[in-house]
Amino acid sequence: MECEVRRKNQKGKHGAGALSYFRHIFTKVRNIPAILIYSRIVLGLAIMLLALWQPTFYRATIIAMIAVGLVSDILDGIVARRLGISTEKMRRLDSGVDQVFWTLVIAGTCIVSPAFYKDHYLALAIIVAAEVATYVLSYIKFQKEVATHAILSKVWTLTIFTTLVDAIATGSATWSFYLCFYAGLISRLEIIGILLLLRQWTNDVPSLYHAVQMRKGRTIKRSKWFNG
């Protein structure tokens, strides 16, 4: 009888130990999205240092780091949604870190390829003004930053990557920049439209069409891969 009790107690201990182990693993997995987000700050700072130091193969290294940053930006949201932890706080953090990362990347590119910025300063000023306008409008209306994560904005990010790779590798960019410029202008105008339509601050609004549906009080469907 005592032996049976001991066996049951041992099984209970093993079961509790296994449960504790899996909880520990799950906690670590839940940290992956945050790690991916904060990794972009590290990458951005590293890119700035490489741009200033300019060691051997610095251009290729910078391009590789931008690519890693872009992949992390894609994965953090996907992983968070799959784990069911895509909260408003995390999405706002993602947007804020994105701004820091791309600002550092653009600053680094300016050091590496200054001619590119001299050739396109007017168009760049227009895009920057449009980007600032979205944040000013969001803060005025909702007292919060932009975190729509619209699909067009994701497309724009890909064109930014293409343009920066072109500028870093060749010192200039023509067709890739104009594609980036118009994609950026259209996506910024869409965000302004979304912000004007929303009755309350909302993160992860896929498009202007979805904002119209939300304005009408309808529930929108978000993709687990891209939004919500």
Image (cartoon, grey):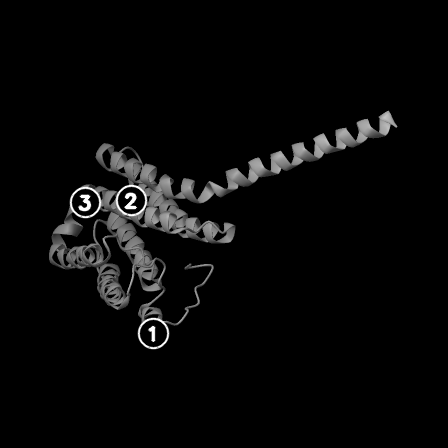
Q: Along the line of sight, which residue is nearer the eye, 94 or 172?
A: 94
Q: Mark 2 or mark 1, which is nearer to you?
A: 1
Assign a secondary structure to mark 2: helix
Whole-angstrom CA distance, mark 2 to mark 3, is: 14 Å
Q: Quadrant of residue 9?
A: top right
Q: Which tag, 2 or 3, sits closer to the chain's start?
A: 2
Q: Are marks 2 and 1 in contact (CB under 8 Å)?
A: no
The image quadrant that residue 47 belongs to is: top left
Circle on res. 101: 2
Residue 40: x and y in percent read 34, 42
Q: Residues within 10 Å of mark 3 (few under 14, many from 20)?
A: some
Q: Nearer the viewer, residue 162 or 3?
A: 3
Number of the label disc, if any, that sits on residue 216: 1
Q: According to the image, label 3 marks what residue?
A: 110
Q: Which residue is drawn at 55% across and 41% down?
A: 26
User: How many callouts does the rendering have?
Assistant: 3
The residue sitting at 30% across, 48% down in the picture is: 98
- Residue 72: image tag: none
Helix, strand or loop under label 1: loop
Mark before the other along the chain sequence, 2 or 1: 2
Please name whichever residue, 178 or 56, is drawn nearer the observer in this view of the structure: 178
Q: Residues within 10 Å of mark 2 (few under 14, many from 20)?
A: many
SS state under label 3: helix
